Amino acid sequence: MNSVSALDSLAGESVVVVGGGFGGLSTACYLADAGADVTLLEKNEQLGGRASTLERDGFRFDMGPSWYLMPDVFERFFAYFGKRPEDYYELTRLDPHYRIFFKDGDRVDMLPDIAANKATFESYEPGAGDRLDDYLRKAERNYRIGMEHFVYTDRPALTDYIDLDVFRYSWGLSLVGSMQDHVENYFDHPKLQQIMQYTLVFLGGAPNNTPALYNLMSHVDFNMGVYYPDGGLAGVVDAIVDLAGELGVEFHTDSPVAEIAGRRGGFAVRTED
């Protein structure tokens, strides 16, 4: 039931993708690979959506995301087309991943070294190092099950969830309670709680109203690592644009869509030009 691997041949079909962010670009790649003639329309002068850039005085600045997380997602995407991320860009794992500044002047580095991070936790609270191991094992399980059996599995109808596998894989996931409750079950020190809740900034949530299931972000952070791509996040955009071009996708920037009209046998897309 993997949605991208189940694409039928689209040879002879003409498809217009509206929007050149990561979603639009990757969709265009999948459709073109299936044989469709794909045109992508983007209203802005740059492709990449939120991952836009500002170039000034010889410097280029990321205007949106600046960290490269979940490298497995990018590896899986490029592998679908027989490619690898390193065919297009290089990654540097950040060391430290980041530095946390507390209001009392204390500061903590989160490192690409679990043993060092355990020692940091232990320095704040006896036993917290071993509890970090337990916490991350749970987070890894949530991530693995969540990605393989929910994110990468297409379930377009409610009845698709009436599946023994869904119940089997859901058993033991952190489906009840908030992140605040979940973290407090492992750590008492307020600074350690704040460190473990920090990744919620990527979700725009607060610890008291974000489901505990999102502890999976700690697996992304501590176990998988924080990276920066050569050329910034725009380098990743350029990579997907290059891949799409290799697949035959045609791009039109500065092309706002004015209307999508239904026609017999399909749709017509009209731009403002």
Image (cartoon, grey):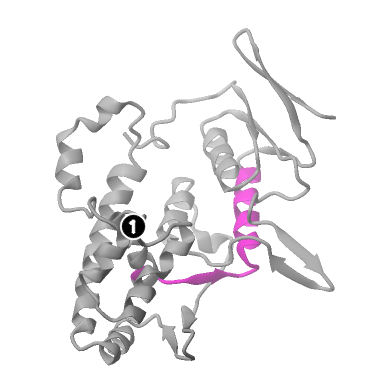
Name the residue carrying label 1. 214
In the rendering, at what x and y percent does residue 128 appear? 22, 82
In the rendering, at what x and y percent does residue 40 appear? 67, 36
In the rendering, at what x and y percent does residue 269 appear? 70, 23
Q: Is residue 169 left or right of residue 1?
A: left
Image quadrant assignment for residue 255? top right
- State the residue at coordinates (54%, 38%): 27
Image quadrant assignment for residue 108? bottom left
Residue type at numbered disc 1: Tyr
| 21 in the magenta segment | no
- State the residue at coordinates (50%, 53%): 83
- State the residue at coordinates (25%, 55%): 177
Q: Residues within 10 Å of mark 1 (few under 14, many from 20)?
A: many
For the C terminus, give its image quadrant: top right
Span highlighted in magenta in the image:
223-246
For the N terminus, give its image quadrant: top left
Q: Is residue 148 above or below residue 225?
A: above
